[in-house]
Image (cartoon, grey):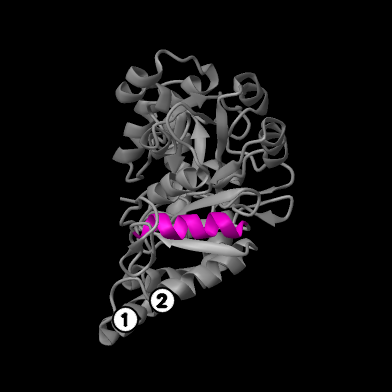
Amino acid sequence: MISISRPIIEDEERQAVLEVLETGQLAQGPRVAMLERRFAEQCCTKHAIAVSSGTAALHLALLAHGVGPGDEVITSPFSFVATASTIMMTGAKPLFADVREDDFCLDPASVRRLLSPRTRAIIGVHLFGQPFDVDAVSRCAADAGVPLIEDAAQAIGGRYGGRPVGSFGTGCFSLYATKNIMCGEGGIVTTNDGILDEQVRLLRSHGASQQYQHVRLGYNLRMNDLCAAIGVAQLAKLERFTCRRRENAAFLDARIQGTKLPRELPGRYHVYHQYTVRIERDRDGVAARLHHAGVGTGVFYRTPIHKQPFVREAVGDVSCPVAERLANEVLSLPVHPSVTDQELLQVVTALNGAVRGA
């Protein structure tokens, strides 16, 4: 079976972990600091703060921006649930703007319709590795006088107008095992704001300004040195991994027939965390035929966030027709760097046959 994702663990990762084990310093330490420096360099930001997960990154970014009960945060319904659940974890209410069909990302016009005096932040999602329309969404945030938070969990290495994602607002990245680079489990917050950097660092470690001196309510959401060591090794390979993903995507683009393909929009650099096509008829049947042919697939996301039971209970019935239509059509294919040319050809042959039979 050609898997939809496959973490790449090489000698550098193994050696990095062994070196940490030999030091005996397993908790947050020098490898975390190294990862933070190199991640900030990658994203062209002044600061990067390592935390325990991408979910923690979003949660702490919201808290550091002062989001809390009674506030509203506008975001996408077409994303992983953490994009909205972290808003609810602060006591604020998520408002869902619809997405656009060409990039699956926030529709700025829909965002603008939701702005109100209660708006406290906007979270844009760089979905599947494609940057959202940063210029237009940033203007919405600026007009409302609120921060832009970039959910870049799937987009490390992506660029908008030649500039790295995570450098426009407050960047939130995931280093989960299936991401373009990974450390098993971890996250990063990026920012150019020194005060925000200080607040996220306090929040991730029990609100402690120094040992046993706690200046605000905080959490235990630190990254350990074992994960950071893997992350440092992976970050050095980001360009190689990204180039291979883009080559694989171009291979698929040139050969898939009868299916709506993902688009890299002008001015954007897509890193293809997922290669997501649209199957307008019998998507699940096509996926089943691909599975039978030995091709793994994924549906991200079958249920939009605003239709999740606990979210509906909190925010009521919301209509996002584009996101709802996409949820019934999207199908992600293997595009990760480990896929061989022969496997890619197998993917193409199986998909083209499955679509013809739909």
- Along the line of sight, the residue nearer the viewer: 312 or 72: 72
Disc on the earlier residue, 1 or 2:
1
Q: Residue at x 43, y 35 (%)?
A: 87
Task: Count neighbours of disc 1 (C-alpha within 10 A) and say few if under 14, some if 14 to 19, many if 20 or more.
Answer: many
Looking at the rendering, which quadrant does residue 201 occupy? bottom left
Q: Which residue is mark 2?
A: 31
Q: Is residue 210 visible?
A: yes
Q: Residue at x 39, y 32 (%)?
A: 91
Secondary structure at numbered mark 2: helix
Secondary structure at numbered mark 1: helix
Q: Which residue is mark 1?
A: 20
Give, as a three-letter code, the residue at label 1. Answer: Val
- Along the line of sight, the residue nearer the viewer: 149 or 18: 149
Residue 78 drawn above or below residue 325 = below
How far apart are the two marked residues, 1 and 2, measured between alpha carbons? 8 Å
Q: Would you say 39 lies left or right of 24 here?
A: right
Q: Would you say 162 lies left or right of 239 here?
A: right
Tell me residue 342's x, y (percent).
Answer: 45, 57
Residue 314 drawn above or below residue 7 = above
Which segment did they paint magenta?
Answer: 193-205
Task: Kindly check if marks 1 and 2 are in contact, taking CB atoms under 8 A apart as contact.
Answer: yes
Q: Tell me if residue 200 is in the magenta stretch.
A: yes
Q: Quadrant of the C terminus?
A: top left
